[in-house]
Image (cartoon, grey):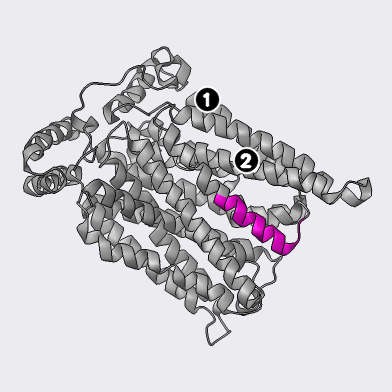
Amino acid sequence: MDKKTEVVLFSSTAIALYGYDQGMMSLINTNRDYLSTIGIAEESPLVGVIVSVYYLGCAVGAILASWLADELGRKPSIFTCLAVTSLGNLIMFLSGLGYGKGAIYVIFIGRIVMGLGVGGIDAVIPVYSAELSSEGGRGKALAQEFQSNIFGLNMAFALNLFVTITLGKTNQWAWRIPIIIMQVYPILLLAFIYRLPETPRWFISKERHEDAKNALEDIYGGDKAEEKFDELKAAFGEESSQTVNYSDMLFPSGSQFHPTMVTVMGQVNQALTGYGAVSVYGPQIFELLGFGVRNAEYLTLGNYVSYFCLMTFAWLLIDKVGRRILMLGGAFGISICFLLLTLLGGLAMNASKLGIPNLAVSIPGIVALYIATGFFGIGWLAEPWLIPTEIFPSSARAQGAAISVVIWGLANFGVTLLTPIGFNNLDYWLFLVFAVTNGFAGWWTWAYSPETGGRSFEENQSFFTDAKEQDTWRVSRINKGEFRHMPNSEKDDADGETAPLLSGSS
């Protein structure tokens, strides 16, 4: 197995951790033994708090992991995050096992600790992958990794559904088994990580030139290693004067404030699509459309399988048509589907009064939700994670990815916290809220998010330099709208930050 395949497999499996947690919590939230063990009712707001506090852990974990990634290297940071994830998962499994008092506090601690690990993984893995990919293949590589995120979602939900059907919602092992099986992911990854290369760019940034050469030889063999080393060293020399800290990124006067805002709004808009809520509360949505509990669970699994299959179009298209088109099309498509779901949800809840057969509205509701989920997977799952790895200089890339995860964590904390409250109080009108927020996400992307596909890191950074000189953030007004679309022609050669480290051959 070549290094490219090993890195993609490793990164994909690591990203699957997040998907597994979403699928795991979907049915745990409705397990009666789980609710009884931690001492809350199914309608309690604490159900949402337990789910959402994980995202706060992710936000903190991203900051810590990005610091480790810059100081100690991408691999040591990933190793630490995997170990923390494993610990948090074990704490969750042990909550209330053989005791009752204080179980809710243990589950909270487990969720936070696991969030620390998964948030760190989500911050460092995209950087690690991007630094080992070519500019013509960055999108495909990350989209494939995020398809494995959906595989993790499917695996967890299918396993959860199987043990729930087999053991029942009153059996403690129906919720403990899916939790502990998650250990497979971090343990396998910890056992495999020693085979992977550290990124030569990180070695060069620390002036560990011999280590960089060894890493390049591990990737390429001896013939190309010296040439690639010279290219990367020259690229780093151009950036070495750009010392970037968080104040440069978070304050309007900072040199990296504009790309930071593009990163922040990408993650805010992803949360506003509503799909963090759909992933965690899928069965409740189908129940709102008029289905019974078990049928709603089967339909949720079907939605996740469709999600996984449709995600294939994301990695087939993302480097062909670009990030912007997929994000704009995704936001528009999801908005239309949620408008339909608002109408269909209202008809489903009042079907008996209106004399409408349940299936006449519930079946179109299934189709609309399945299509909306596909639009999200193609247009919004990978793109907000990819863009931050493409628009910052090497000296700020890990920090940019950390900010991305922090905002993702905080935004999803809010959405997953408020969603069950919304279902309990707004019913089908919650779909209308998401239709409006998707409209906003599409508008902001059209106005302010540049197309970063098919360009080198340096070319993408030039967009922000030109934006500052032209005193505007509107994509259509910068360089005659050049960044509204992919470049017209491919470059013949690549060098510096453009150069692929893991291209077609190893």
Q: Going from the N terminus, do you reach mark 1 or mark 2 first?
A: 2
Residue 228 in the image: x percent, y percent? 12, 36
Determine if the magenta segment contains residue 498. no
The reply to whether discs 1 and 2 touch (Cβ–Cβ < 8 Å) is: no
Q: Is residue 497 above or below residue 485?
A: below
The amino acid type found where label 1 is placed reads Trp
Closer-to-camera residue (198/156): 156
Extent of the magenta region: 291-305
Q: Is residue 445 left or right of residue 346?
A: left
Q: Residue lying at the far bottom in this picture: please name it.
A: 98
- Which residue is depicted at the point 12% across and 46% down? 212
Q: Nearer the viewer, mark 1 or mark 2?
A: 2
- Which residue is depicted at the point 31% across and 23% down? 462
Closer-to-camera residue (398/369): 369
Q: Quadrant of residue 501?
A: top left
Residue 371 is marked as 2
Residue 193 in the image: x percent, y percent? 25, 60
Which element carries disc 2, helix, strand or loop? helix
The amino acid type found where label 2 is placed reads Ile
The answer to whether residue 244 shows anywhere in this view is no
Q: Is residue 219 left or right of residue 421?
A: left
Residue named by callout 1: 446
